[in-house]
Amino acid sequence: MGMVGGGKDAFIGAIHRIAANMDGLIELSCGALSINPEIAKESGKELFLPEDRTYLSFEEMIKKESEMPADKRIDFITIVTPNFAHYAPAAMALDHGFNVVIEKPMTFTLQEAKDLKKKLEESGKILCLTHTYSGFPMVKQAREMVKNGDLGKVRKIIVEYNQGWLSRLSEREGNAQASWRTDPKKSGKAGAMGDIGTHAAHLAEYISGLQITKLCADLNILVEGRALDDDGNVLLRFNDNVPGVLMASQVAAGEENNLKIRIYGENGGIEWAEQEPNTLWVKWLDKPTQLYRAGANALGASDFETKNCRTPAGHPEGYLEAFANIYRNFAHTLMAKMEGKEPTKEMLDFPGIEDGVRGMAFIENVVASGNSKEKWTDYKI
Amino acid sequence: MGMVGGGKDAFIGAIHRIAANMDGLIELSCGALSINPEIAKESGKELFLPEDRTYLSFEEMIKKESEMPADKRIDFITIVTPNFAHYAPAAMALDHGFNVVIEKPMTFTLQEAKDLKKKLEESGKILCLTHTYSGFPMVKQAREMVKNGDLGKVRKIIVEYNQGWLSRLSEREGNAQASWRTDPKKSGKAGAMGDIGTHAAHLAEYISGLQITKLCADLNILVEGRALDDDGNVLLRFNDNVPGVLMASQVAAGEENNLKIRIYGENGGIEWAEQEPNTLWVKWLDKPTQLYRAGANALGASDFETKNCRTPAGHPEGYLEAFANIYRNFAHTLMAKMEGKEPTKEMLDFPGIEDGVRGMAFIENVVASGNSKEKWTDYKI
Amino acid sequence: MGMVGGGKDAFIGAIHRIAANMDGLIELSCGALSINPEIAKESGKELFLPEDRTYLSFEEMIKKESEMPADKRIDFITIVTPNFAHYAPAAMALDHGFNVVIEKPMTFTLQEAKDLKKKLEESGKILCLTHTYSGFPMVKQAREMVKNGDLGKVRKIIVEYNQGWLSRLSEREGNAQASWRTDPKKSGKAGAMGDIGTHAAHLAEYISGLQITKLCADLNILVEGRALDDDGNVLLRFNDNVPGVLMASQVAAGEENNLKIRIYGENGGIEWAEQEPNTLWVKWLDKPTQLYRAGANALGASDFETKNCRTPAGHPEGYLEAFANIYRNFAHTLMAKMEGKEPTKEMLDFPGIEDGVRGMAFIENVVASGNSKEKWTDYKI
Amino acid sequence: MGMVGGGKDAFIGAIHRIAANMDGLIELSCGALSINPEIAKESGKELFLPEDRTYLSFEEMIKKESEMPADKRIDFITIVTPNFAHYAPAAMALDHGFNVVIEKPMTFTLQEAKDLKKKLEESGKILCLTHTYSGFPMVKQAREMVKNGDLGKVRKIIVEYNQGWLSRLSEREGNAQASWRTDPKKSGKAGAMGDIGTHAAHLAEYISGLQITKLCADLNILVEGRALDDDGNVLLRFNDNVPGVLMASQVAAGEENNLKIRIYGENGGIEWAEQEPNTLWVKWLDKPTQLYRAGANALGASDFETKNCRTPAGHPEGYLEAFANIYRNFAHTLMAKMEGKEPTKEMLDFPGIEDGVRGMAFIENVVASGNSKEKWTDYKI
C-alpha cells in the first residue's frame, strides 16, 4: 500500500493506517504523505518508511512505483487527501495499473465521479471507497435481515447523522479539519451534506437495498459566516415510493458522532446507532424486542456479520474495526484475484465505484433541491 | 367533575379518571358516559356514581347539573369523546357556566376551535386541554432551561412521535380505538397528524417557546385501504427561521409510544423521550453530558419541575402522573379562582384554548402542505 | 380507609394516599395523622376529612370507628408510622375487627411479628404489607417466567439496593426521614438492612419463589457517628443451596433508588431495575436478548403482568402505580370477601403476614451474621 | 516480537497479534505457535512468517533468536499459551535477554510468580502482563478521578464479571477454550476466579489505588461435573477497611462479557462497564450525573485518557484498542529504554510483575477462603 496524503498533521490518514495494519494483511510501503516536503519527510520517518519510498508528490510516487519490479511495488494506493485532490491521483493510479482505495466523497464533482467510473472499467482494476459505516458487523446483520424479508416490505427509513463540532466558527481559529471542510474550493458544493450526509445516504441505501429516487431538501447555514451548509433536513422517496427522512448536522451542539438509522417494515423495525455499534435493536410488531449483538459467535447472526468480527460477543469492536473490515474485505478480494480465484460475496462486500457515483449524485441533487422552491426534486445521475 | 364519554368500552376516559383521582383534589360526581344507554348505566354503576347522576346524554347532564344548588353541582365537565363530539358539549358547558377539560385535538375543525375560543372569552371560564406530554416534570425542566438561555439561541428542533399499533388494518378487525381514529367523519382532516402529530407540535412549541411559522409536509398512507394519513414527515420553520423536523407515524411497527424531542442551541442540546421520562439528557458543547433527573428533590431543578413531582428522584413517575399534573394544576387554578386568589404561574401551567386553536391550525396547515407541490406553506390561523 | 400517621410533615403517608386514591376503589374517610394535635388537625383539613373523623390518636380512631354503623365505618386502617409504632395500632385494629394495611418492615422486632401473625389468624381478617416493589408489572412477569421454568433451574440470584441519601450525617441537620431511620429506638436493630435490605430480600424471594436458608453478612457503618448499619453486603444461600448476593447501601453517593435484581438459570437470566421498571431484560443462552415491556397489551405477557397495568405499552407507569397495585389487589380481595366471593389468585397477589414475618427474621438474622465470625449463619425464624 | 502459542486453533493469540499490529510499532517476526508441528508450520505460513523463523518449540525459538545479530533478532517474546505453560518460556526468555509480554494469570502458581519476579529483577528486562481491561481509556480516566480525590475518600467498591459461556459442560463437547480452562492441570487452582476473577480484582485495585487486605469467598461449582469453580462471590476489605464485593461467574447464562465496576466515595460514585466502554458514569451526590466520554479530544479528560485513544469522541474504540494500548505503552517504554530515554508515566502505564504476583496471590487466597469456615481470611502474598 502507498498512501497519498495522511501526513502527521492530518486526521483520516492515521485512521486508514490503523485500519490497514490491523489484520496483518497490508503493509504501508511508501507514501506521498504531504504536499509540504518537510512534513512529507518527517511523516515518512515516523512511519518507518524507507527514505527512497518517501515521495514528495503522488505523481512521483505512482511513476516510480510503477517502474519497480512486480514483487516489490505496491498493489494499491490509498487516497486520503481533501475531496478536491481525489480524482487526479486516483485516475493516474488506474492509468498506471494500481488498484485504488479512496476516501469519501469519492471526487469533487459528479462529473469526475463518472469519469473515474469509465476509467476504472477500462482498467479492470478494483476501487474501494471507505464508507466506513457499512463496515460495522451489525449494519451487515441489518442488511441481511432486510434482504431476508424478516421485516416484511420496507415502509419507512429514518437516517440521521448529528455532530456538534462545527458549532462555532472553528475554521477561523486554526482548526485544519474545519478549515477545508467548510471551504467550497476544497470540499465541493456541499458542507455537512457532503461530509456526513453522504455517509447517511449510503448507509440507508446499503441496509435497505433501496435507492433514493427523489428528495426535498432544506439546507441551512446555522453558524453565520459560513459558505456551505452546516445543517440540513431532507425528505426522501426511495424506490416504490417508500418515504424517508435524512437529517445531518455539524452544529448539533453536544453531539459527537451520532449516526443512527431506523428502518420500519410491515412486521417490525430495526435500529442501529454508531455510538453503540455492537447492538442491533430489532423491534417486532407481535413479539418482544430483540437485541442482536455483534460477535464472532453471535446468536442468530448471518455469515456477513460473523465474518466481520474478530472477537466473541461482549468484547466490543468499534469504528477502527469497521474501517479495517473494509480494508480486509478489499484485501481478500485483491488476493483472491491475484491468485486467480473468484472472491466470495463476503469478500466483495465493500463500497466501490457505484457507491462513489451515487454519493456525488446525492450531493448534486440535495443541493439542487435545497435551492428549489418545488417540493420534490428527482434524483438524477 | 362530570364526564362526557369514557364508558367501559373506551380508553382515554379511564386515564382521565385516574389522573383526576390521584391527588385527592377532584371527585367524579356524575357522567354522561356513553351514547349507548346500557353502557352508560353499567359504567356509572362500576364507577360508584349515584343513579340519578348517571345521565344518558351530555345535554341532560349539563342541564340538570346546572339546575342543582351551587354546593352540590359539579365545577367542571371533562370531555373524552372522539374528536367530532368535542365542540357541542364544550360549548354547552361554557354556556351553562361550567369550566371545561377537553381531550386533544380540541375540536373537529379549526373553525370550531375559533368559535370555542370566542365563547370561552365571553364566559370568563377556564378551559384545560389535555396535552399530556407537557405535564412531565422533565419537559418542564427542559422548557425552563431553554427559557433561561442555558443552551444559548435555539438552532434546531427535532420532534418525533412513532407508534406501530396501526401497522395492520386493525380498524377492520373490531379495534374501536383504530376505528374512529382512521375515520375522517370522526377524527377530522388528519389521521396520525391529528392524533399524535399535534402532540409533537405542541411539545416542540411548549419547550422551545417558539412557534411554527411555515412547514413542508409529506403525508403518507402506508397501509393500503386507509382514508387518512397514518404517517408523515414535516420540515418546519419556527420564528426567526429556526429549522425543525417533525415525524409522526402510527405504522412504525415495533414502536410503542416513542415520543422524543431534541432541541439544539449554541451551547448544547437537550433530549427527552416519553418512554424514559424521568431523565433529561443535557449535552454540552464544552463539558460532559449531564443527566437531569426528575424528583421532588431533584438536583439543579426548577420549581416547575419539583412542583410537578410527587416522589423523590429514583421513584419513577410516568404517564399517569403527567396527566395528573395537568388536572392538578387546573384544579389548583380553579380553587384559587373560587377563593378569589391569584393563581401562581406554576398553577397556570396547563394547556388551554390557545394551544387548542394552534393544534387545530396545525392539522389544517399540515394537510394543506401535504397537498401542495410547493416546498413551503405558511402556517395560517 | 383510616390512616394512622402520614401527617403533613411525613413522606410515606402521602404516597399511600395517592396509591389508594388512584383507582377510585378506596376512600380516605378518617385519620389519626399525627401525634402532634396541631399537625393532626391541619393535615385532616388539608385532606378534606370531616372534623369529627380527624382523630388525635389511633386508639381514639379505632375505638370510635368500631362504634359506628357498619355502612359508615371504615373497612381497614393503614399504618404509616415509623417502625416502632406499627404493632400497637395493627394489633388493636385486628382486635376491633378491622383489616390492616401496614408499611414495611412490619414490626419493630421479630417477636412482635410473630405475635401479630397469631392475632391475625385468630381474627380472620386480612393484612397487607406494602412491599412496593413486588407491585411492579415486570416483577410479576419475571416471577411468572421463573415459575414457568423459562430459565430452567435457578442457579444464582444477585439483588442490590443502592441509595446515596445518607452519605452525610443529615440526621443531625434536621432531616426527619434520616432521623428516625438511623435511630435504633425508632427503626429497630438494623438501619439500611431494615429499611431497604428487607425490600431487596423480599424481591429476591418473591420473584425466585425460593427462600433464604443461610447468610454471611458484612454490615458497615460508613459514615462515622452512626449507630446503625448504613451499608451491607451479604452472601446468601437459598433453598437447594442456590447462591446469591444481597447488597444494600444508603451511602452509595450519587445513587437515587437503585434497586436491581438479576436471576440466572440454566437457560438464561432476567434483569430488572426499579429505575426503568417497564422493561424486563431476558437474556438467553441460545438466542438474542429480549426486552419484555410493561403494558396492558404487552407482548408475551402473563395475566399477572397485564392485570397490574393501566395503560398500553409505552405509557410508562412507575412507583406510584406499583404501590397502587398493592392497594388495588388488596381492595379487590376485600371486596370479593365482603361479597362472599372467592378472590382470584391475581387479587391475592399482595404481600401479607408471612412476608412480614420473614422480613423481620431477615433483620434479626442479618444482624446476627454481621456480628458472627463464622462464615455462614443459618436463617432462623 | 516472537510469539509462543497462538496457533490457528487458539483464541487469544490472534487477539495479541491484532493488538500488536494496530499501531504500526511492532512486527511479528517469528513464532513457536503450537506444540503440534503441523499447526505450527501452517500457522506460520498464514501469518507470512519466514519458514526459518517458524519454530517448533519455544526453546528452539529463544535459543536461535538469541544467536541472531542484534539488529535482526526480536526484542521481546509474547506468551499466549494456557496458564501452566507460562513460566518456562518466560523464565527462559529473561535468561536469554528478551523482554516478555505474558497473558494473565501470570503463572500456574504463586510460587512461580515469585520466582519470575526474582528473575526479572536480576535480568533488568521489562515484563508486561496483559490485564486488558486496564487498557481502556475510561478506566484510566476513572483512576485519575479517584486519585485526584474527585469522589472524596473511597467508601465502597463493587466489581463483577459475569459470563455465560460455561453454562453447559461444553468442555466435554470439544470446546478447546472450555477444556483447558476447566482443567486443574492446565488452569491451576481456580476456574472462574483465575480466568476472570483476577481481571476483576486487578481492575478494582488499578482504579481505586487500594489493595485487597482480606476476603470472604463463596466459590461454587454450579454445573455438575466440574472440578473447578465456575462461579463465586467474595466479600472484600481493602486498605483502611474499605468494604467491597467481587462477583465472577462463567455460568451466568445470557451474559457475554459483563465486566462492571462501581466505586463510591464521599461525594459521588463512578461506574464503568466493559460492554459500553466509552462512557464513564460519574454520579454526584450534589449535582446531576455526568457522562464522561472517551475520545482523543474528550471533554474534561486526563492525559492518561486521551493518550490511550486514537479517534475523536463518538468513534467507539473497544476491546482490541484497549489491548493495543497495553502493547503500545509497553512498546513506547521499550523504545525509550533502547534510546536511553526515561519513559514517561503514561508510557509506563501497563501492568507488570507486581500485578502478576498479586493476581496469583488472589487465586491462592480466594481458594483458601472458599475452603474456610471462618468469615475473613487475610490476604497473604
Image: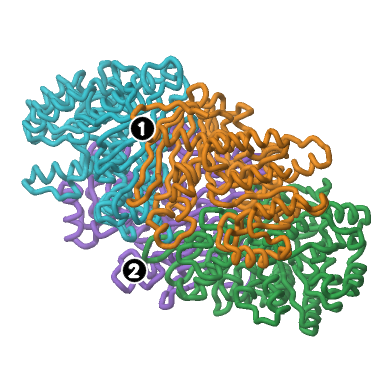
Chain colours: A cyan, B orange, C green, D purple
Indicate the amino acid at tag 1: Val
Residue B31 image-quadrant placement: bottom right
Question: Is there a contact, CB below 8 Å, between mark 1 and mark 2?
Answer: no
Label 1 to label 2: alpha-carbon separation? 55 Å
Secondary structure beneath label 1: strand
Q: Residues within 10 Å of mark 1 (few under 14, many from 20)?
A: many
**Tag 1 and tag 2 share a subunit:** no
Q: Quadrant of the C terminus of chain A?
A: top left
Q: Is residue C77 at least partly visible in the picture?
A: yes
- Which dot, 1 or 2, sits closer to the camera? 1
Residue topped by disc 2? D179
Q: Position of residue B81 (x, y in %)?
A: 57, 52
Residue D270, relative to residue C266: is it above or below?
Answer: above
Provide the secondary structure element on which disc 2 rests. helix
Q: Residues within 10 Å of mark 2 (few under 14, many from 20)?
A: some
Q: Quadrant of residue A282?
A: bottom left
Residue beneath label 1, please?
Answer: A234
**Up-down relation of residue A98 to residue D92 (above or below):** above
Type of residue at label 2?
Ser
Label 2 is found on which chain of the structure? D
| Image quadrant occupied by the N terminus of chain A | top left
Q: Which mark is residue D345?
A: none
Residue at position x 30%, y 24% in the image: A367
Give how far across and how far down residue C182 sits, in percent.
79, 57
Residue B50 placement, left or right of B206: right
Circle 1 chain: A
